[in-house]
Image (tube, helix red, strand yellow):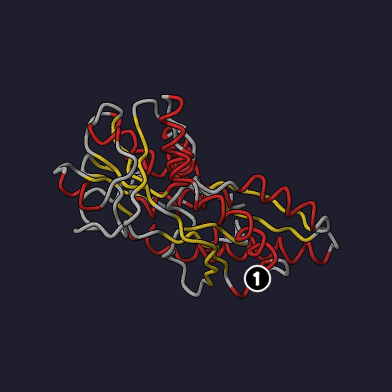
Amino acid sequence: MDVDLRRLRYFLEVADQLSFVQAAAKLYITQPALSRHIATLESDLGVSLFHRSRNGTTLTPQGAALVDNARTLLRNAADFERQARLLGRSPVRFVVGFMPGVDAGALIAEFARTYPEVDVTPIFTSTTTQAPFLIDGRADIVFCRPPIAVEGARIIDLFQEPLVAAVPRDHPFAAEHSLSTVDLEAAGEPIHGRAGSGLPGSGAGFDDLEPQEAIMAVAAGLGLAILPAGVAAFYSDPGVCYIPVPDAVPQYVSLAYLPDRAMPHTTAFADLCRAALEPRVRLLPDLLADGVRATGQTP
């Protein structure tokens, strides 16, 4: 029996999320397609991996017993591919996991021009799912907003990213040039995405929302949001304005990698990212707000 590594990745994502719907969203495939892949894997292995019921999805005892082995198999497969490339004298392959809010395309293009001997490849992750890409070897290094749930990962801090408030376009705050954390708390509205922002009660409430979900909630009039400026610039909604929050605690944007898989050009890539991104991001909150006022449109 040949084990399809792609289906193993799908199995692990469902095991992590315990939801076919959420796992499908993370994997950028449809839920029916994901269900078919899992059913095929179960048939190939001859075991049931998940219990599905109205109360949700849980791992069967057999599924739970296979999770760690599946992670090890994927990690070994990635290591095998990397070693084979080196033995075959192929160009060094350097896979970079990028996330919304980081302008990785221009950086990777510049890096590729500077180091033509490196086969640099971008791979998209969401704002919260970088860990599996490092663990199973799909990426050599990933952009992240620490902490990242990868044991033994090395973190290279690049810059501190200022935060902005997302408010409905017809909200009284939309006319302000800046807001404070006190202003946001005094509004008495739900505040989405506020973990680590310095707001009282940070870490409670709506922190499980992905940034795009938080922005959709704001557009629907279901509260306010506080977000990294880069994320706000990435997601556009005509019903939302972004206002700088200078006293909110900035969030680090970092690179993460595993030391036993460090690439020769890791430090050079980090230096390039730091030099290119830090000045740009520092000005981003005011550029977002000025762009809204000048054009009447969300940037």
Amino acid beneath label 1: Ala
Name the residue: 79% across, 51% down: 113
Side of 266 where 201 appears, left or right: left
Name the residue: 42% across, 39% down: 25
Q: Nearer the viewer, residue 99 or 28?
A: 99
Q: Nearer the viewer, residue 138 or 115?
A: 115
Please state the horizontal and vertical placement of residue 58, each as a whole percent of the image: 30, 52
The residue wearing badge 1 is 262
Residue 176 sits in quarter: top left
Q: Relative to residue 80, is residue 183 depicted above or below?
A: above
Please state the horizontal and vertical placement of residue 296, each as a whole percent of the image: 41, 24
Please state the horizontal and vertical placement of residue 40, each as a whole percent of the image: 49, 42
Side of 72 where 197 appears, left or right: left
Looking at the rendered structure, the secondary structure element under dot 1 is: loop
Name the residue: 31% across, 49% down: 193
Crowding near the residue tagged with mark 1, few <14, some 14–19, many ≥20 C-alpha atoms within 10 Å? some
Side of 149 where 189 appears, left or right: left
Q: Nearer the viewer, residue 209 or 194?
A: 194
Please state the horizontal and vertical placement of residue 228, each as a whole percent of the image: 41, 50
Side of 151 where 111 appears, left or right: right
Residue 256 sits in quarter: bottom right
Task: Tell which residue pokes out farthest to the right in this image.
Answer: 89
**Number of on-image labels:** 1
Name the residue: 41% across, 35% down: 31
